[in-house]
Image (tube, coloured by chain):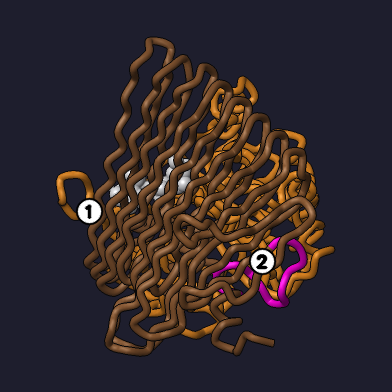
Amino acid sequence: MKFDQLDMTLLQAIADIKNLPQGALNIRRDGQAVLRQSSPNISITTNPENGGLIVDIKAGTKNETVHVPVILTQSGFKDKVYNKFIVGEDADVTIIAGCGIHNDSHADSSHDGIHEVIVKKGARMKYIEKHYGEGSGKGKRILNPTTIIRVESGATAEMEMSQIKGVDDTLRSTVAYIKEKGNLKVVERLLTHDSQIAESDIEVHIEGGGGVAQILSRSVAQDNSTQVFKAALYGENECSGHVECDAIIMDGAKIRAVPQLVAENAEAILTHEAAIGKIAGEQLIKLMSLGLSEQEAINTILEGFLR
Amino acid sequence: MLKLENITMAVNDNNGENREIIHGISMEFQPGKLYAVTGPNGGGKTSIAKLIMGIYKHNCGSIYLNDEDISDLNVSERARKGIAYAFQQPPRFKGLRVSDLLQIACPGIDNISLRASLRDVGLCPEDYLDRDVGPGLSGGEIKRVEIAQVLGRDASVSIFDEPEAGVDLWTIQKLIGIIISKFKGNDDLTAIIITHNENVLHICDEIIVVEDGLIKAKGTPEEIWPLIREDVECKMKEQCRGEIVYEI
Ligand SMILES: Nc1ncnc2c1ncn2[C@@H]1O[C@H](COP(=O)(O)OP(=O)(O)OP(=O)(O)O)[C@@H](O)[C@H]1O
Ligand SMILES: [Mg+2]
């Protein structure tokens, strides 16, 4: 086996991998593909232009899962990768990505992932990406993912992106284009602590008639961390879109939420909701009246909120 | 036994002024008995319940549970000592499911009892266990989940704050049955039900009428009923007309 305990801890945290999964898989460790397997319907190859991955999912592929986790265990390693995912027409698949960093040194470790995702006509895709950092060093753990997603006509894409612990610095940038009757749902979950900084910029262009987009963000900012959430929804056709940002702020944290709606068509229906606040005292009291301590009550509320 | 001795409590009202709302009351709740607390809106019933649970702090007096002064214990500590309170207006949560709350209320509860506790309050477990206790539940549904939590805790003192409010008449009847079978004749448990409902008042051993932060009367239903009958019947009629059946 090529993976040690440290690798497996990271893999489990970001991709729920306890045993190596069946099916298409690519595990990248410190800039190298250490394990790659394709399946009859899903091919994983190296892009000759930039050394990144091309994950090509055949039209009509049903109920398959591709795992493409990235782990960084070498201290101070700076990784940059370009990946392309093509989900063929009428396919129905789940992509599990994610990045875990272990850094015990004083040098910063970083991963910049640039992903292009194309969900072809009538296909359905669920994309799950978790970010996680650990290690005792003073070196920062930095993740800067950029995702461009194209949802073709009648296709449905759901992206679930979460960063739960240990990432010091992150700038996530997501741009989406939705064609006729395409449907995109982006769900972000974020927890920041200590002096972490996390920024997420999402821009969704609904280009096709009947397109639907939903951007939902739930976040918790603790200690002295800073969060910035910017979501811009462009309705360029008869379409509907909704942005929702719900944040719990604690301690000395700062949160900035900037939902933006741009309608370029009279038939576009765009809405947004943003709420930032501390944990409701009533909720705490209620859980304490069931026997939880104050700290247990806080943890329970946060866990539920970010679930 | 739960004992309140000369309890006084003040709140800060909108103008930031201290206003006394409970004026030196004393009460005793014996194990094995079912108590009703009733009286007009704003009389101080919920405040008394919150004082017992430790949610509100009293300025003067003491609260004893089995001769131990629990005045300085916080909400969690009182819960662990065996006091449970079903809120008049339970808060909603984002991301906590009905099953989560029931599991917190009754640690280690097995699956069968968990489901039974929902059926007791007239909710079908298949439909409700995985639902968020959030904006998606109706007022009556939230109330029933709340009551299920307190029933499941098997606390030595259980307080239900207007369990009938927002709950349909069929479920109220069912609840009365459950309360009778759980508390009547159980020498270890005390139940305190804050209520305006005639049927609930009649199953209790003792009725306490609270008005203007004072105890106005107390006694058996036979003694008290004639005194409060008009008020309660008036409120029941409103309820049946649907005016206050669903609370927001
Ligand atoms: N936290 C608080 N802040 C300010 N005033 C309060 C607070 N809690 C209670 N009060 C006031 O104390 C009085 C008693 O309120 P309480 O909720 O105990 O009444 P209640 O008897 O439960 O009424 P109801 O039948 O309407 O539920 C009211 O005048 C109420 O406005
Ligand atoms: Mg009340």
Above or below residue A92? Residue A287 is: below
Tell which subunit mark 1 falls on.
B
Please state if B207 lies on the left or on the right of B4 as rendered.
Answer: right
Please state if B33 lies on the left or on the right of A146 as rendered.
Answer: right
Query: What range is drawn magenta here?
Result: A12-24
Mark 2 within 8 Å of ligand 2, using the beta carbon = no
Q: Secondary structure at mark 1?
A: strand
B186 or A234, nearer to the observer? A234
Q: Residue drawn 47% across and 52% down? A: A115
Q: Residue drawn 52% across and 78% down? A: B65
Q: Position of residue A229 (x, y in %)?
A: 31, 48
Q: CA distance from mark 1 to mark 2?
A: 35 Å
Q: Quadrant of the N terminus of chain B?
A: bottom right
Which of the chains is orange?
A: B
Residue linked to disc 1: B12
Q: Residue drawn 53% across and 32% down? A: B231
Q: Amino acid at mark 1?
A: Asn
Q: Position of residue A20 (x, y in %)?
A: 71, 74
Please state if A199 lies on the left or on the right of A155 as rendered.
Answer: left
| Viewer-side label of 1, 2 | 2
Q: Is residue B149 visible?
A: no
Occupied quadrant, residue A148: top left
Mark 1 within 8 Å of ligand 1, using the beta carbon = yes
Above or below residue B13? Residue A108 is: below
Mark sitting earlier along the chain (1/2): 1
Chain A representation colour: brown
Q: Main secondary structure of the magenta part?
A: loop
Above or below residue A197? Residue B39 is: above
Please state if A111 lies on the left or on the right of A306 as rendered.
Answer: left
Residue linked to disc 2: B103
Q: Is residue B82 magenta?
A: no
Q: Position of residue A11 (x, y in %)?
A: 58, 75
